[in-house]
Amino acid sequence: MALYSEKVMDHFRNPRNVGVIEDADGVGEVGNAKCGDIMKMYLKIDDDTITDVKFETFGCGSAIASSSMATELIKGQPVSDALKLTNKAVAEALDGLPDYKMHCSVLAEEAIKNALDDYYSKNPDKRKE
Ligand code: FES
């Protein structure tokens, strides 16, 4: 069996939503101290919906594929759904990642959560418990 699924290879070779949103409503950056990889997510939020999302990832192929898939999963979705996105869901949407590459998908989950934290810190009135 191939180490990486076709979906991982596709999102690695043709990542979706790469770039920067200059006037983002929330920005989140995370890194993994062990491998040194860094991921940054930019969110545009309107009326509790993620209207646009872009990412920059300086990291391995699995991190790039995970960021790309994560942006596809949350784009156009309610903020409440994005908050619930887990790294497992990202890895499953990619048809799996090797065990030792699961931490790459964790970066995607954390970067989105950090970006949403940033959004809520700028818009405290929007936070719902
Ligand atoms: Fe570090 Fe993939 S090896 S994010």
Image (spheres, rainbow, N blue to C red):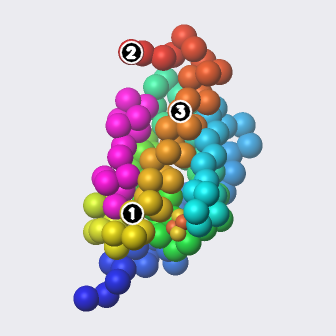
Q: List the residue tagged with mark 1.
A: 102
**Mark 1 C-beta closer than 8 Å to ligand 1:** no
Distance from the alpha carbon under mark 1 to that under mark 2: 29 Å
Q: Amino acid at mark 3?
A: Leu
Q: Amino acid at mark 1?
A: Met
Mark found first going from the N terminus, 1 or 2: 1
In the displayed structure, 127 sits above or below 28; it is above
Mark found first going from the N terminus, 2 or 3: 3
Q: Is residue 50 left or right of residue 31?
A: left
Q: Amino acid at mark 2?
A: Glu
Q: Nearer the viewer, residue 9 or 37?
A: 37
Distance from the alpha carbon under mark 3 to that under mark 1: 22 Å
Q: Is residue 77 left or right of residue 1?
A: right
Quadrant position of residue 115: top right
Q: Element at badge 2?
A: loop
Distance from the alpha carbon under mark 2 to that under mark 3: 14 Å
Q: Which residues are magenta?
A: 79-91
CB contact under 8 Å: marks 1 and 2: no
Q: Is residue 96 left or right of residue 100?
A: left
Mark found first going from the N terminus, 3 or 1: 1
Decide: few, some or many residues near mark 1? Use Cα within 10 Å; few <14, some 14-19, many ≥20. some
At 30% from the left edge and 68% from the top edge, which residue is drawn?
96
Toward the bottom, the furthest residue is: 1
In the displayed structure, 26 sits above or below 85; it is above
Toward the left, the furthest residue is: 1
Query: From the image, which quarter does the N terminus lie in?
Result: bottom left
How many numbered discs sit on the rendered protein?
3
Q: List the residue tagged with mark 3.
A: 116
